[in-house]
């Protein structure tokens, strides 16, 4: 018996098959990218806070540059979250979103302290999982069907038999 419960085809014959995509989604890549985006956003906010603090105490240090880096880092964190959600919602574009997550995660090292380094690591893993994700496919095998008026197929061996035949001439199985 084959995987769908049909008998194997006779030698030299085959059953038609059809591949059907499943509704799987890259959940692991989505979760890791979402968490990475949150950490990168927090790293950006931390830089904004430190920049504002340094500007307020004015020990000759310029906090404006840190605020600008923090804003860019926070935007990168928001983009990583958005691309992670898009990766989950439209998995057919998994390579594009995986690459964007990977690039933004690496760039966050220079703008948001890599999301306190944890965002960088999770973003690299999530982006790589998004790029490498492949949905499994279901293969449907159909039993042989005789053309109308040409007879029927034996359910045991798949041999084509005449319309009024009661037993398969190939295997002897009763034809129902």
Image (cartoon, helix red, strand yellow):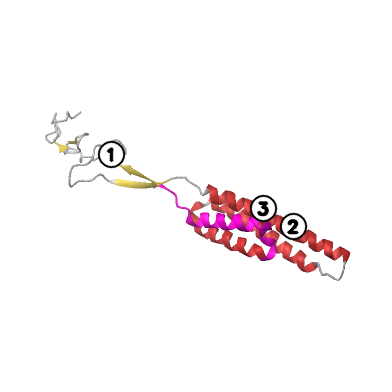
Q: Is residue 15 above or below residue 104?
A: above
Residue situated furthest left in the rendering: 169
| Residue 45 badge | 2
| Residue 145 badge | none
Q: Residue at x 56, y 50 (%)?
A: 30
Q: Nearer the viewer, residue 55 or 135?
A: 55
- State the extent of the magenta-drawn residues as a range: 110-136
Horizontal side of residue 128 vs 63, given as left or right: left
Q: Is residue 32 above or below residue 169?
A: below
Q: Position of residue 165 (x, y in %)?
A: 13, 31
| Residue 38 badge | 3
Query: Which residue matches tag 1?
Result: 2
Q: Residue at x 63, y 51 (%)?
A: 35
Instruction: Name the chief secondary structure element in magenta.
Output: helix
Image quadrant occupied by the N terminus: top left
Circle 2 Cα neighbour tier, 10 Å, few/some/many (<14 / 14–19 / ≥20): many
Question: Is the Cβ of the residue at disc 1 closer than 8 Å to that at disc 3?
Answer: no
Is 134 part of what is drawn in magenta? yes
Horizontal side of residue 131 vs 166, given as left or right: right
Badge 1 or badge 2: first in the primary sequence: 1
């Amino acid at each position: 018996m084959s995987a769908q419960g049909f008998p194997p085809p006779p030698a030299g014959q085959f059953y038609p098959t059809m591949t059907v995509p499943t509704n799987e989604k890259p959940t692991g890549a989505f979760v890791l990218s979402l968490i990475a985006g949150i950490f990168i956003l927090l790293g950006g906010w931390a830089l904004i806070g430190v920049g504002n603090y340094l500007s307020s105490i004015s020990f000759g240090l310029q906090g404006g540059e840190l605020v600008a880096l923090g804003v860019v880092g926070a935007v990168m964190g928001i983009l990583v979250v958005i691309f992670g959600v898009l990766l989950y919602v439209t998995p057919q574009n998994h390579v594009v979103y995986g690459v964007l997550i990977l690039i933004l995660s690496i760039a966050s090292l220079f703008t948001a302290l890599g999301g306190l380094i944890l965002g960088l690591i999770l973003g690299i893993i999530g982006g790589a999982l998004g790029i490498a994700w492949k949905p499994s496919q279901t293969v449907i095998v159909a039993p042989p069907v005789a053309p109308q008026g040409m007879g029927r197929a034996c359910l045991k061996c798949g041999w084509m038999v005449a319309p009024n035949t009661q037993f398969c001439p190939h295997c002897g199985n009763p034809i129902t």
